[in-house]
């Protein structure tokens, strides 16, 4: 004889683990802080290394810095300062986007953020 009824009721999901709506960006304490694109972060880190006189090839003793530089090399879309500044000017003209959204769009491929900006303009 099989009993297909559950032996206990499902556990309730605590409020802290409930899924939030993605319609609204909720960053908590980071809501209005400045955010950098990967290209901007690479520019900042490389400028600090240059100012300190540290050769990029001599960072093997710091595994976090070494992996960060590898990440920047792989994912920074824009390598030239003028290009990074042009993207920042373009994105900062869209005040309807949060700083975090602008930074994320600046990290993606230009065709992607063009489509997103066009869609946001229609709203």
Image (spheres, helix red, strand yellow):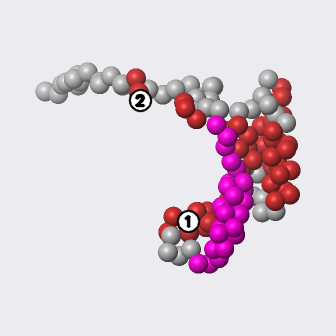
Which residue in the protein does label 2 denote? 17
Q: Which residue appears at 72% of the width and 56% of the height?
A: 39
Q: Is residue 23 above or below residue 100?
A: above
Q: Quadrant of residue 112?
A: top right
Quadrant of the image for the C terminus?
Answer: top right
Query: Would residue 4 appear left or right of 96 to someone viewing this image?
Result: left
Q: Position of residue 69 (x, y in %)?
A: 62, 66
Q: Earlier in the sequence, mark 1 or mark 2?
A: 2
Query: Would residue 67 appear left or right of 103 to someone viewing this image?
Result: left
Marks 1 and 2 sit apart, C-alpha to C-alpha, by 33 Å
Q: Position of residue 30 (x, y in %)?
A: 58, 35
- Determine which of the numbered discs, if any, sits on residue 65 in the image: 1
- Give yes or no for contact between labels 1 and 2 (Cβ–Cβ under 8 Å): no
Q: Position of residue 52 (x, y in %)?
A: 65, 69
Q: Which residue appears at 17% of the width and 27% of the height?
A: 2
Quadrant of the image for the N terminus?
Answer: top left
Give neighbour class at mark 1: few <14, some 14-19, many 20+ (Cα, 10 Å).
some
Boundaries of the magenta span: 33-58
Q: Which residue appears at 70% of the width and 69% of the height?
A: 50
Give the number of the mark in front: 1 or 2. Answer: 1
């Amino acid at each position: 004889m099989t009993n297909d009824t559950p032996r206990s009721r499902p556990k309730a999901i605590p409020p802290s683990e409930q899924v939030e709506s993605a319609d609204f960006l909720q960053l908590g304490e980071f809501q209005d802080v400045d955010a950098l694109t990967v290209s901007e972060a690479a520019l900042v880190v490389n400028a600090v290394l240059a100012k300190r006189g540290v050769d990029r090839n001599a960072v093997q003793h710091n595994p976090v810095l070494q992996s960060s530089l590898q990440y920047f090399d792989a994912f920074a879309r824009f390598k030239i300062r003028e290009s990074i500044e042009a993207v920042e000017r373009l994105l900062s003209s869209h005040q309807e986007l949060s700083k975090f959204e602008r930074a994320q769009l600046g990290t993606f491929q230009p065709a992607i953020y063009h489509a997103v900006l066009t869609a946001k303009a229609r709203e």
